[in-house]
Amino acid sequence: MGFLEGKKILITGVASNRSIAWGCAEAMHRQGAELAFTYQNDKLKSRVTDMAAKCGSDLVLPLDVSRDEDIDALFAALGEQWDGLDGIVHSIAFAPRDQLEGEYVDAVTREGFNTAHEISAYSFAALAKGGRAMMEGRNGALLTMTYLGAVRAVPNYNVMGVAKASLEANVRYLAASLGPRGTRVNAVSAGPIRTLAAAGISDFRDMLKQVEERTPMRRNVTIEEVGNAAAFLCSDLASGITGDVVYVDTGYHILG
Ligand code: 0WD
């Protein structure tokens, strides 16, 4: 029996079979979770529907996190299908491409800053708010994806690092708010992985190469490895862990 047997988990942020969210979905499916999926726009609908089917799910709902009405409609629709919710995987981030190259001080704009924070950080709190009634008292878990650029000045990551710092603070504040209701809140800080979102970061290839050369395990992390850690953190095996950021990065963050 899988360690997520009987758990109902919502997966956001599947954009392709390279998405970290897909690694989470496959790992959670292997551990027996029942899954629902969201897709950002009509272009992604059929792809996400096909991928959901591979996990035995036909619960596929639209969600653009910049729209409050989408968030309301998502939990209303989910509430019609499920009597409760045990987990939400938030695997969503966005900053305009011009923000992700060159010196931070040159690249950052008011609009770029606001967009990055709204889509990449506020949206986690918004999903927590939307889902909290369904999650009440079920020993559930919220999980988000962050990156080392939240705590170090990583070249080209720029305003996304500032937004990830906000996201990590969100993890702590949400953990404090929702702990008394039985919901845990954590983040996985993943090492760099070649995905659609990563393609927007200037010199991403160099980042991958640099990690491979220097990191203790001398290789980059996979979405399967991130997915396995995510599955653990959303399960009762992690019942004592909340408000934390767990690094799944082949050890790169320990280097000086
Ligand atoms: O190296 C990496 N790939 C790392 C990613 C290292 C550490 C962390 N992460 C984080 C990302 O910052 C993000 O929070 O993991 C999360 C997932 O990213 P990913 O798996 O690397 O990227 P991707 O497969 O592109 O999925 C992110 C998706 C979007 O994809 P695109 O590339 O089409 O923007 O987030 C979704 C979208 O599907 N997304 C939204 N969903 C709902 N509403 C929105 C939105 N407004 N904007 C983006």
Image (cartoon, rainbow, N blue to C red):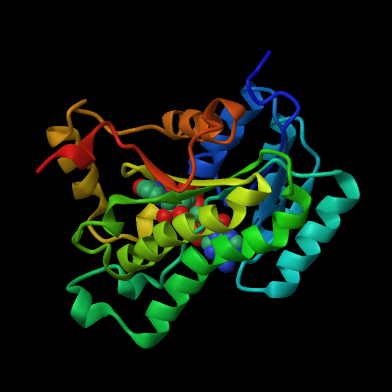
Quick check: 216 above or below 114? above
Q: Which quadrant does the N terminus fall into?
A: top right
> In the picture provided, is 71 more to the left or to the right than 239?
right
Report whether residue 19 is seen: no
Q: Residue furthest right?
A: 80
Which percent across, then down, holds residue 52?
71, 38
Q: Residue at x 85, y 44 (%)?
A: 82
Which of the 4 image quadrants contains residue 193? top left
Quick check: 10 above or below 248? below
Which percent across, then down, holds residue 146?
40, 51
Which percent across, then down, holds residue 98?
32, 75
Q: Residue at x 42, y 29 (%)?
A: 225
| 103, 151: nearer the viewer | 151
> In the picture provided, is 106 more to the left or to the right than 10?
left
| 237, 189: nearer the viewer | 237
Which percent across, then down, holds residue 180?
63, 50
Which of the 4 image quadrants contains residue 105? bottom left
Q: Residue at x 21, y 48 (%)?
A: 207
> In the picture provided, is 169 more to the left or to the right than 205?
right
